[in-house]
Image: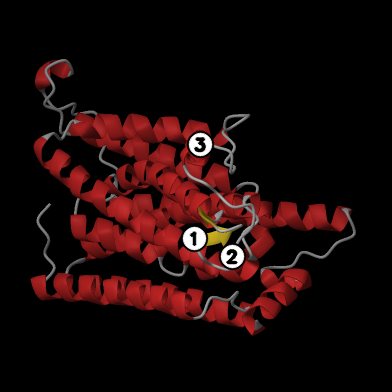
Amino acid sequence: MNSVLPLWFEISSMIVLVAILILDLLLIIRRPHAPSMREASLWVGFYVLLALMFAGAIFLLGDVQHGTEFLAGWLTEYSLSIDNLFVFVLILGSFSVPYAYQQRALMIGIVLALIFRGMFILVGAAVIERFLAIFFVFGAWLIWTAWQQVKPGGEEHGGDSWVIRQVKKVVPISEEYDGGKFRTVVNGKRMWTPFLLVIVSLGTTDLLFALDSIPAIFGITQSPFIVFTANVFALMGLRQLYFLLGGLLERLVYLKYGIAAILAFIGVKLIFHALHENSLSIINGGEPVKWAPEIGTNFSLLFILVAMAIATIASVVHARKDAKAHGETLHLGAASNPAKRDEASDQDES
């Protein structure tokens, strides 16, 4: 798909987005801390507003089609990123990462996610241009991934994965953290801190999620620029969202069903598109399958919004009923955990 967006807009957008990410990373390096609810809310709101303004610019400088594709792609990637964030929660918990340094770990995980997705975007765009039938593979993969989301006894994400066990065999790892450092000295011997294992685990997770997110958004748009920017905006503010939602992530019990529905829907959409544009001789003699419908971007956007809204509302209702049954009050974010808040404050002061 040839972009109708001005070249100057695409180039300047990429420069600004990369600059924001670099600035965000530098702030974490210089001042590692656990943000307050107010700070996290402001940052999440800022990034969401920025994405909506960017969508508005695409509507004005491009057309309705590209603007709608960006919104649908951004919402899809955002929902998948929240799922990614949930796994980050499990990883940080399994490695007992100090609360004040969780932002640093999250930021590195987000940067790795962006790198892996950028690589897959380039590969995916090149393959699609030469081999349109790849949509059959993408569609089948997304439907299989959707099933993996909801099937009983799904894979657990913890610190003792196969990759982590291999790293432990060849790299000396200390028992304790040394602030936010990767290297430390124990009894005169240079060792890596558990922070290395955290980053390896986050990177492995990012790689697996990229395998799902890139085919998903290519099912909405084939514009590499929109694919990349939608991914960047979906990852922006993700670490602040982690502190904003806090323990609520574990209470979003129906989130996986909403994400599975989106993945399955896009998978079916991709297969229909591949049938509609078919050139494989083994299918319908190499002729397009005329009965295969083309699912429009507007309908896709509506489906994504409805699926995520139903999953979120159902999860919140379930969480409130569960909290009421146990005589508790449902809270959001770090403010609901004074111990963690005090721990973060003590580490900031030191």
Give yes or no for contact between labels 1 and 2 (Cβ–Cβ under 8 Å): yes
Q: Residue at x 77, y 70 (%)?
A: 339
Say which quarter of the image contains residue 278.
Answer: top left
- The residue pinned by badge 3 equals 169
Identify the amino acid type marked 2.
Asp
Q: Position of residue 134 (x, y in %)?
A: 21, 33
Query: Which of disc 3 and disc 1 is earlier in sequence?
Result: 3
Report the residue marked by disc 2: 178
Crowd around label 1: few <14 · some 14–19 · many ≥20 (10 Å)? some
Instruction: Name the outermost residue toward the front.
Output: 188
Cβ–Cβ under 8 Å for marks 3 and 2 = no
Amino acid type, callout 1: Arg
Quarter residue 98 falls in:
bottom right
Q: Where is mark 1, residue-wise?
A: 183
Label 3 crowd bin: few (<14), some (14–19), many (20+), radius 10 Å: few
- Closer to the chain start, of discs 1 and 2, is 2
The kind of secondary structure element at disc 3 is helix
Q: Is residue 181 above or below residue 255?
A: below
Identify the residue shown where x is 49% and y is 74%. 44
For numbered disc 2, what is the local secondary structure?
Answer: loop
Question: Looking at the image, can residue 76 be seen?
Answer: yes
* Residue 187 sits above or below residue 278 on the image: below
- The C terminus sits in image quarter: bottom right
- Which residue does the image show at 46% across and 70% down from the upper left? 237
Separation (CA) of disc 3 from disc 2: 21 Å
Q: Position of residue 8 (x, y in %)?
A: 11, 75
**Mark 1 → mark 3, Cα distance in angstroms:** 17 Å
Which disc, if any, is residue 323? none
126 in relation to 61, above or below: above
Q: CA distance from mark 1 to mark 2?
A: 8 Å
Residue 72 visible in this rendered orientation of the protein: no
Q: Residues within 10 Å of mark 2 (few under 14, many from 20)?
A: some
